[in-house]
Amino acid sequence: ENLGWFQPAMQAVRDLPAGAKTLLLYEPRSLYCAPRCAPDEIMDRWKRTRALESTGAVLDQWQAEGFTHVLLYRQGVEFLVEAGDPHHPPQDLGALEQFLSHLPPPVEFGGVYELYSLKP
């Protein structure tokens, strides 16, 4: 109960089919889902990957790395936007939203987490 929406989101990652691998975005904790997930330990995964500059290239890169899903910490992204964090400028976060809009609709966890499939 103390973990809030974190626990149901991690349970959903654990419940994905065998062979699934989930990339966490803006979530540095991989408690309860390792080794089936890769945390965003210093919250720079999107910024580094965005350098590829195209939605298709990002998707191809993540799929080549074996990722089948993305778990976004939506509340974390909203915090960065509201705080005006200089390390996460609006154009980077806007590009993330555009990328996510090309994926199938996510499974939502209380408006806090969103689980996206990287499969078409």
Image (tube, rainbow, N blue to C red):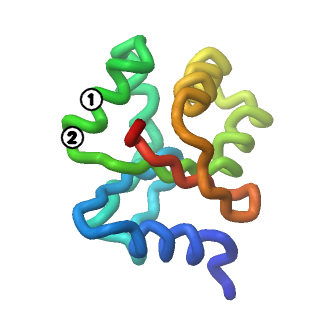
Q: Is residue 75 above or below residue 104?
A: below
Name which residue lies at 73% across and 41% down: 78
Please provide percent x and percent y for residue 103. 52, 35
Asked whether the viewer can see residue 39, the reply is yes
Looking at the rendered image, the quarter that the C terminus falls into is: top left
Q: Is disc 1 surrounded by few (<14), some (14 to 19) or many (20+) residues within 10 Å?
A: some
Q: Mark 2 points at which residue?
A: 65
Q: Is residue 93 above or below residue 91?
A: below
Please provide percent x and percent y for residue 61. 27, 29
Q: In the image, what residue type sits under mark 2?
A: Glu
Q: In which quarter of the image is residue 42?
A: top left
Instruction: Point out the residue furthest to the bottom here.
Output: 1
Q: Are marks 1 and 2 in contact (CB under 8 Å)?
A: yes
Name which residue lies at 55% across and 40% down: 104
- What secondary structure is found at the residue carrying circle 1? helix
Q: Quadrant of residue 108?
A: bottom right
- What secondary structure is found at the residue carrying circle 2? loop
Q: Is disc 2 surrounded by few (<14), some (14 to 19) or many (20+) residues within 10 Å?
A: few
Q: In the image, what residue type sits under mark 1?
A: Gln
Name which residue lies at 76% across and 35% down: 83
Q: In this view, does 8 lie above or below 49?
A: below
Give the numbered dot on residue 19. none
Q: Quadrant of residue 79?
A: top right
Give the numbered dot on residue 61. 1
Q: In this orientation, which residue lies closer to the viewer: 105 or 112?
A: 105
Name which residue lies at 70% across and 58% down: 112
Please provide percent x and percent y for residue 15. 42, 74
